[in-house]
Image (cartoon, rainbow, N blue to C red):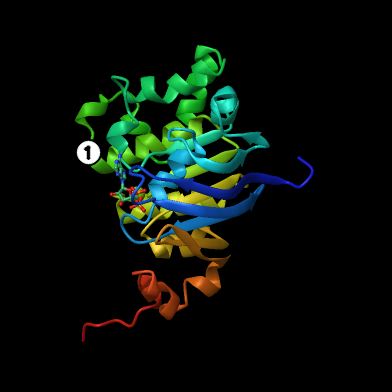
Amino acid sequence: MSDNFVIKAEKVSFAYDQNSPVLREISFHVRAGESVGIIGANGAGKSTLFQLLTGLLPHQGDLQVAGLPVEKAHLAAIRAKEGFVFQDSENQLFMPTVLDDLTFGPLNYGMSPEEAEAAADEALERLQIAHLKHRQNYRLSGGEKRLVCLAAVLAMKPEILLMDEPSITLDPVHRRNLIEILNGMGETKLIASHDLDMIMETCERVMVISEGKICADGPAREILQDQALLASCHLELPYCLQQPHWK
Ligand SMILES: Nc1ncnc2c1ncn2[C@@H]1O[C@H](COP(=O)(O)OP(=O)(O)O)[C@@H](O)[C@H]1O
Ligand SMILES: [Mg+2]
């Protein structure tokens, strides 16, 4: 791609109910290798935006991923490049065991069973959950399911990572490990989260969604320190920038 953009959104809109659009003519571009935090209050439209970017919901306006318009004819090609971690792990895990889930995608994209299992093992090791390999998904805790979803996406080795609340339900050690994994990956990353401390550590750029619009888009270090801007979008400073309040 000559301009090096992996995502191009021009006046993209979406409404579940025509009387109250969730996203109203939003425009943004993401370059290859950028890591972009997407922040906004509950209901701002972060998860909806990810569903537009994966073609799970239809959109109005011009939306391109990897140089292809997000429309039916190109969805298979687009999804082969995208790794999407859903906000709700229950929607992501659908095979009986962890290993089945981790090898499903790689097998579907043509890896041999041995290659797929090696990709699964590597992802499990990176997320420090090799012990879960043969467990049944329905018996996992919420945090374990989260880690398995993250591993399933890493096993696919996607070019574009779309992560919706990736750190939710993770204990501090696994959260820290996730931050290190993300920082070690050169792929394009879009991370939606209320964990602004994680966004601060993993993203160079932040987009703030409020009232259906992108109300700020710029360097993370500027936006995440701008208390007035965050407050106007019903957000607070990252914890690490707040004053300790116990004596
Ligand atoms: N399936 C749906 N049907 C109708 N409205 C929905 C649906 N999913 C989300 N919404 C509404 O769309 C808005 C944006 O939701 P969402 O994208 O999940 O926000 P966020 O991820 O930023 O919390 C909210 O007002 C939410 O209630
Ligand atoms: Mg959401």
Q: Quadrant of the N terminus?
A: top right
Q: Quadrant of residue 88?
A: top left
Q: Which residue appears at 57% of the width and 40% of the height?
A: 160
Looking at numbered disc 1 in the image, what kind of residue is underneath it? Ser
Mark 1 residue's CB less than 8 Å from ligand 2: no
**Seen from this angle, which residue lies furthest front?**
19
Q: Is residue 25 above or below residue 91?
A: below
Question: Left or right: 75 with respect to 152?
Answer: right
Q: Which residue appears at 49% of the width and 43% of the height?
A: 162
Q: Which residue appears at 59% of the width and 26% of the height?
A: 74
Q: Quadrant of residue 233?
A: bottom left
- Find numbered disc 1 in the image and state the secondary structure of the residue it sits on: loop
Q: Is residue 152 above or below residue 218?
A: above
Q: Is residue 69 above or below residue 227?
A: above
Name the residue nearer the viewer: 31 or 95: 31
| Rendered location of residue 43, percent (x, y) | 32, 54
| Rendered location of residue 167, percent (x, y) | 36, 51
Q: Which residue appears at 50% of the width and 16% of the height?
A: 107
| Rendered location of residue 242, percent (x, y) | 35, 79
Badge 1 density bin: few <14, some 14–19, many ≥20, Cα 10 Å: few
**Seen from this angle, which residue lies furthest top?**
112
Does residue 3 show up? yes
Q: Is residue 175 above or below residue 159?
A: below
